[in-house]
Image: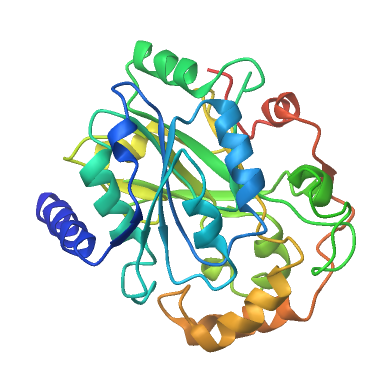
Amino acid sequence: MRWKRRELIWRAIRAGRRLTPVVDRTAVIRPGDVLAVTVLRNEIAHLPGFLDHYRALGVAHFLMVDNASDDGSDRFLADQPDVSLWRCADSYRAARFGLDWAGAILWRHGRGHWCLTVDADELLVYPDHDRLDLPGLCARLEADGRPGMGAVMLDLYPTGPLGTADAPEGAALTERLPWFDPGPWRSSRLEPRRNLWLQGGPRDRVFFADRPRRAPTMNKLPLMRWSRRQVYVNSTHSMLPPRLNLIYDGPGDPRLSGVLLHGKFLPQIVEKSTEELDRAQHFADPAAYRDYHRRVAEGPVLHHAGSLRYRGWRQLVDLGLMGPG
């Protein structure tokens, strides 16, 4: 694993040479700032709410890589005073689904900072987030001797078919997509990285019931105190060195943890899934997932009798979806 870690770090450093700066404001980053790192393409529908959410939580600076957006995402981000933006038109899939680019940014700017590595459609919530900002959360984690915090990814969805929303554009994500699956969950530890493999949620239930091992991984390690000795391996689902994967055990873990509210199923998902049938950039074996993208594009209803309406972080603690610490 030591050689694998070094290989991935060097791969990220090389990938960094392919990033073209659009606007670089990293000189304003101060010691102790919490940073957010994001790789994106065509996420203009998410970006205003994404920035508002993380600014309110205390992110000081956003480090973002745009993968050839054509919906105005890059222009919107370049105008934001707390964003540094790079562009790369290379293959997202060939860059380990953007992880090489995120790794390059973390290598250059993340050392010694608490870094939140999230997608543009992921909003982190955690116990007391309405009173405890990210700097305060990170101080609490440091006091407990913890190098990071894990989270379960919770897919949100509308009452009606995919392609619709329960509230108009501009409303909060949890008003537009108010429903989620509280369970069931399947989990195991994988060797040799000792990483958690958590599966469940509406995608597992609706799209992969007959192929459960192909269902998406739902655990992440989004918030880490960054060191140049560490690297993400599979999205933010797992890391090296292996001991870092043991900081989170998924739903039911009593240690302080969070939930990533996942806005994947906003109305644009139908158009994006149709596009992905041609681009084939989001899976290691795209052909095996063509049926998934085709079914999403058909606009099925994910809501069912077991769906719960999102009520806030206390609800998630009560359900065991995040630990109070």
Is the residue 308 above or below the residue 5 in the image? above
In the rendered image of this protein, does residue 316 appear above or below residue 47? Answer: above
Query: Left or right: where does residue 288 sit relative to residue 167?
Result: left
Q: How many marks?
A: 0
| 1 left or right, relative to 324 | left
Q: Is residue 77 above or below residue 213?
A: above
Q: Residue furthest top?
A: 143
Q: Position of residue 25 (x, y in %)?
A: 34, 41
- Taking the spot 52% from the left edge, 38% from the top edge, the residue there is 151
Is 254 or 260 nearer to us in this picture?
A: 260
Res 193 visible: no
- Asked where in the image residue 261 lies, by quadrant, the reply is top right
Query: Whole-percent x and y of residue 310?
Result: 79, 39
Where is residue 171 shown, x and y percent of the image?
Answer: 81, 46
Q: Residue at x 72, y 75 (%)?
A: 270
Q: Residue at x 63, y 37 (%)?
A: 52
